[in-house]
Image: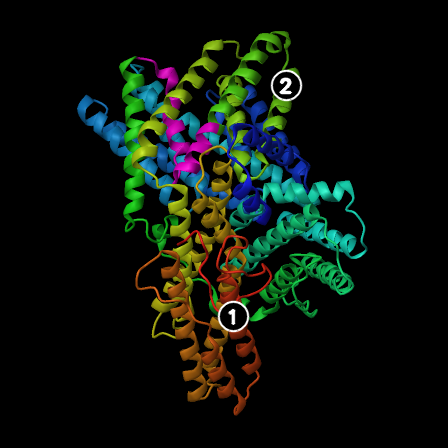
Amino acid sequence: MATHATQLRHQPASRGASWLWLREFIRWELAPYPERINAVIRMTVAATLVMLIVEIFRFPNAALGGYYTILLARENLAATWRGVRLATLGSVVGCLYTLLGMMLFRGYPVTHFFWVIASLYVVFFVMRTATNYGAALGFAFLLANTLAVWDSSLPSEIQVESTLWPLLVIATGTGVTVATEAVYRIFDRSDPLITSVDDLLLAVQQAAECFAALRALPKSLHNRILQYDMTGTGRLRTALQRQGVQPTKRAQRSALISLAGRLIGLATNLARNHPHPGEDDAPRLRTLAERLRTIRTELRESRVNFASPAVLIGQPSSGCPGLQEMERTVALITEVFHRDEIVDSSQSVPARDGWRALFLPDAFENREYQRFASAGCLAATVCYVIYNAIAWPGISTCIITCVVTALSTVGTSLQKQSLRIVGYVVGGLVMGVSAQILILPGIDSVFGFALFFAAGTAIAAWIATSSPRLSYLGLQIMLAFYFVNLTSARIQTDLTIARDKVVGVWLGLLAMGFIFDRFGPKSDAEQLQKLLVRNIRMLAQLAVSPVVSSGAITALQLGRLRSQINDNFTSLASQMDAVQFEFQFHHRREQDVAKWEWAQRAQPDLRSIFVLELSLLSHRGRWENASELTSVQVQALDHFLTEFSGELMHTAAWITHEEDAAAPRVLNDPIQRLQEAYEGHSTSNSQAILDICQQMVSSLVMLRRPTPGRHAKHKCDVDCAPSEPIRAEGFL
């Protein structure tokens, strides 16, 4: 949010300030929000049922069964079922791969060692390039868990059984999760994503009403706004990614989430700066609040085409800074959902062939993925050699640690490693070992153990339902807790289990820190700029993409491009959240903070351009089929799109400081030519195309606004779009 950038820019990177920020961060992350209690209850019930099945049928090493009850999506029943199928598929493939490898290489120590290295490379490659994290994790978990088994001197029958048991355990956990969700959805069919967005917009609406009435914000409302501003929209983006909706609807909802988060940031600025609205500001605030109320109603009723008029955008206000930006953001929400034509079925994304749908489009072309897999493989191989050399198979959790903490950038990887060790200390030592000493000796029934197990699961599940910056901690607390209490079908009182797991985690973290982070990922600032530039260039490519082809090739390419842009938006937003977290505890350069701030402010404008381009693509497809446009109109439209695409490419070059990047221009001439072309021959779609193109230009101009308060020779109000583009400092 905007307030985060201001705080990062002016706040010294002192240890006291960092811990103060951490305290506030944890406070708001753990605060309740809509649907959180329901989600925690469902997770706890599902995990407890898995525990009862494990105890009754005496499944060994059942920790992954309980873990998957938390890991799977719960946004809707279809998403849960899809996640279950893919996770089970990944586990089956991992099991077959392991058994086949052991059949071929188990009797030859040298070839077995090289097979392990090759398998670890495959694991990291799949984790980086798979389109479904649950399926990749199922494959990786099963392979990593069974390496220590096949390195032991146990009989072959026991080794095969130990490889097959995790498959049954994972299938049990996923099956119970689906059954639990199916029962819950009988009573509640609401969309948790829309419910959460509605609460964000409600908070902004109520704040606008208070500002208009010159009233102080109630403490509860003030706290809600601060909570939403601190936690961000990462949880909503994760929910959207799991829902599995069609690309156009996903683009709409993604833009809605980004714009709602932008409104929360602006409302937080107003709340902290104690605005003094003038006579002209109060009516504008009331109009803004009324429009938000209408948008919320239409969202709850699942409308696509907002019938209400957009909020008029007034002049910048000195007494209420940010009001003009709030009006424009609300207008963008209306624009995103106003165009029902972008949901045209003719623009649906073609299905990718077979196994290609399981991996990213550039999985076997991008050398960064190979670099990632090589660095992860090296770190995991060092751990594998160490625990075999000292004959300590109990610390084989170091392999899993390497797998689940390997991310594409240094900052996010360090964050996950820190959360993982804290999670294992809390779940394995504090909740696990202390319970073995103080609680478990007094429990003599399954019912008593179920109560204890449900309490520990509920604590971890509450943390796991936080934003992505903290939810990983809850997952690791739960996994460590289950490693201690679900390793056998009896109450576990052996303290060495928790000790070995934590030592293994430490070894994995050391290997990742000294090996993977030095050779694998890039820095946060580099990755942030790379994602931003890539998305802008893809938007430029989408603007001039053909809509009619002689076959299905063009449609398939369009579908891949749209899917990549959607995925890049998600990656970019997640990266910005991670960068903000890292800035609090590491040395931060002023330039890096400016990059983060500019990229975050540019997100709503880029998403708006994306949705508008999708709308225009649909119009162009209809016009090509119906031949409604004259040759002059077609040429004017093509000229505008070519110029617009060129300006996006100039913007990308401007960000990367390329020497031949000329100063961007405002697209006045192409728009004027387009207007003149439609004056003589008007059709039912004429006004629509003009409106779309004007909105695209408006979003492009707003994208180039400078970061406020960062320029010495350029003075510009934050709400004022410059007549001539100015470079955003921090990318220079």
Give the magenta-colored segment's residue range. Answer: 391-418
Residue plotted at (68% across, 37% down): 32
Q: CA distance from mark 1 to mark 2?
A: 65 Å
Residue position marked by numbered label 2 in the rendering: 452
Looking at the image, the residue that sits furthest to the front is 713
Amino acid type of disc 1?
Ser
Would you say residue 639 sits in the magenta stretch?
Answer: no
Tell me if I can see residue 281 in this picture: yes
* In this view, the mark in front (1 or 2): 1
Color theme of the render = rainbow
> Where residue 84 sits: x, y (%)?
50, 40
Q: Is residue 22 left or right of residue 298?
A: left
* Label 2: how many Cα within 10 Å (few below 14, some 14–19, many 20+): some
Element type at mark 2: helix
* Label 1: how many Cα within 10 Å (few below 14, some 14–19, many 20+): few
Residue position marked by numbered label 1 in the rendering: 723
> Where residue 27 sits: x, y (%)?
64, 32
Amino acid type of disc 2?
Phe
